[in-house]
Amino acid sequence: MLRRRHPSFPPRPPLPRPRLALFVSVALLAGVPSLLSSHDAAGQRRDRQPSAAAGRMLASFPVAAPAYYRPVIVDGKAFPVARSNFLSLLEFPNNWHAPRLRLINGTWQLVGVHLGIDIISERGTPVLAMERGVVENVGWTFYSGTRVGVRGADGRYYLYAHLSSVQRGILPGAQVGAGAVLGRVGNTGYGPPGHRDEFPPHLHFGIEAASGEWVNPYPILVKLYSAVVAQTVRAQTILDRLAAAGKRGAWGTLAGRTYMSLNLPGGE
């Protein structure tokens, strides 16, 4: 009998994954403490008292707490998993129609195909509505675990599955805008209500056409994620420049427009 396991993920595609924005701030900040210490010939560290100039330099660098970037809306749509300003996992291999296990007469058989794309991320990462619409389904299904289903304004059904939790106020009949937080990434499903940990945390994202046929979301996900990366890197670069110039007021204003005020993974 096959063990109840989610198939392994295929190799990730060559997606744009620049995550250098945080390194700018980290590198700048890392260089400052180096002014405060030196090493002798034997390699032993000798701490020295910070100079007044070094103290002023340290005080001039605003540092953002780990946070998620606000949704980037392109043609009325948002990428369905929030990107962060810290070193976090976010990738989505093109596993459309990959083999999947199905429970048939009490036996797990490799007979199904994947009708969506898995977006791999840490548990607790915010899940965002791609399209504005009306929440149609909330709750548990055997394979999807905790899921939210939204009937988009375009008539298509958007499925967000394997959630660890659902955002407060996300109930059947609720209207949501593109980029609205629906819940948090998890790994629920493939079992009775509450079952989890059969596979790594990820969002199963699916799109069902009004005709009832599931369509491959991968192309639109690539387009939207590319836009997210471009805009967030641009914003983070400006923030880093403002920090280096000690412009706290301008930095704080832009940071408020750039980051969402949500808990980090695991804080749901």
Image: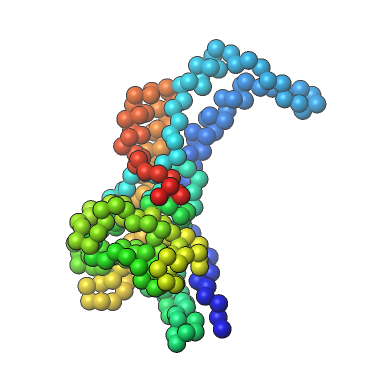
- Here the colouring is rainbow
Residue 37, percent across and down? 66, 22
Q: Is residue 109 visible?
A: no
Based on the displayed image, in which of its 4 quarters is residue 102 positioned? bottom left
Residue that sits furthest to the front in the current view: 193
Residue 122, percent across and down? 47, 54
What residue is at 31 percent from the left and 74 percent from the top?
Answer: 214
Q: Is residue 211 visible?
A: yes
Q: State left or right for residue 245 relative to residue 210.
A: right
Q: State left or right for residue 208 relative to residue 83.
A: left
Residue that sits furthest to the top in the current view: 52
160 or 98, nearer to the observer: 160
Residue that sits furthest to the right in the current view: 42
Based on the displayed image, in which of its 4 quarters is residue 204 positioned? bottom left
Q: State left or right for residue 42 relative to residue 81.
A: right
Residue 211, percent across and down? 22, 76
What residue is at 44 percent from the left and 72 percent from the top?
Answer: 191
Quarter of the rendering occupied by the N terminus: bottom right
Q: State left or right for residue 204 relative to residue 137.
A: right
215 or 82, nearer to the observer: 82
Total labels drawn: 0
8 to 81, vertically: above or below: below
What residue is at 41 percent from the left and 58 percent from the top?
Answer: 164
Residue 101, percent across and down? 47, 78
